Structure formats: structure tokens, C-alpha cells
Amino acid sequence: YEQAVEPVELVVRLRSADLSRLAGAAGDRAMATSTRWDDPIDPDYLHVRLAFDWDDDAIEAALKLTDRVEIIEPAWARQAIIDSARAILARYSEGSAVVRPD
């Protein structure tokens, strides 16, 4: 069964030109209820508030956009991205992969 859950909201900052990429990563449902406003410092950027059903969905959408998006809030989501980036770096650092003989 499904019970009502509080939406997980993210506020992200990205270039206006990357809005369609955000839509692809976040999905139609998150984009349909999103709100947008211009970045107060740089007119080439937007802020977008998105709502997701689950924490994992929110983080996954942000990770799909790599460095094209910055999570502004909440702080736990920013930290989740930092933790994921560190884990990726550790996995791909020199000596981290098992080398198979040819």
C-alpha cells in the first residue's frame, strides 16, 4: 500500500540553457509542480524548486546533471552530493580498480 508522504523539495541553480536537461533528469511530475525564478546575481542562471516523492529520487536527478546543477537547499542534499562525489572519486582513483592480466 502507499501512504501519503511529505514531498522532498530541492532548490537548484543552473544555467537557463540547461533547463531542458533538468526536465529530462527530474521528470515530468517534478517539473509540472516546479517554480522558477531568476538568479539575483547572474541573468544566465535560474533557481528552480522541485518536489520529489523520495530522497533518492531527488539526489539521483541532481547527479544525472553532474556539474550543470548546484543544489542550493536543503543542506542534507548538498552533503549527499558531496558524499557521492567522494565515493566516485575513490572508486576511480589510481589503484582502486582490480587490474586483470591480459
Image (cartoon, rainbow, N blue to C red):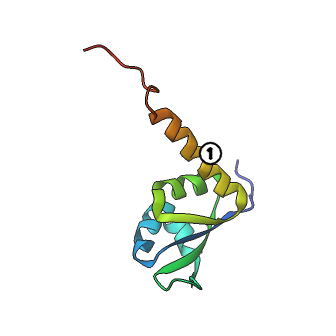
Number of callouts: 1
Q: Which residue: 71% across, 60% down? A: 75
Q: Residue furthest top?
A: 101
Q: Residue furthest front?
A: 94
Q: Quadrant location of the C terminus?
A: top left
Residue 16 lies in quadrant: bottom left
**Which residue is the site of mark 1?**
83
Residue 98 lies in quadrant: top left
Residue 11 lies, in percent from the top left, at: 63, 70
Q: Would you say 94 lies left or right of 42 here?
A: left
Residue 36 lies, in percent from the top left, at: 57, 81
Q: Is the residue 100 above or below the residue 23 in the image?
A: above
Residue 94 lies, in percent from the top left, at: 43, 30
Q: Is the residue 51 above or below the residue 82 in the image?
A: below
Q: Is the residue 36 above or below the residue 54 in the image?
A: below
Q: Amino acid at mark 1?
A: Asp
Q: What kind of element bears circle 1?
A: helix
Residue 54 shows in this picture:
no
Q: Which residue: 49% across, 86% down? A: 43
Q: Which residue: 46% across, 64% down? A: 68
Residue 42 shows in this picture:
yes
Q: Circle 1: is it few (<14), some (14-19), or many (20+) Cα within 10 Å?
A: few
Q: Which residue: 44% across, 25% down? A: 95
Q: Is the residue 1 above or below the residue 9 in the image?
A: above
Residue 67 lies, in percent from the top left, at: 47, 59
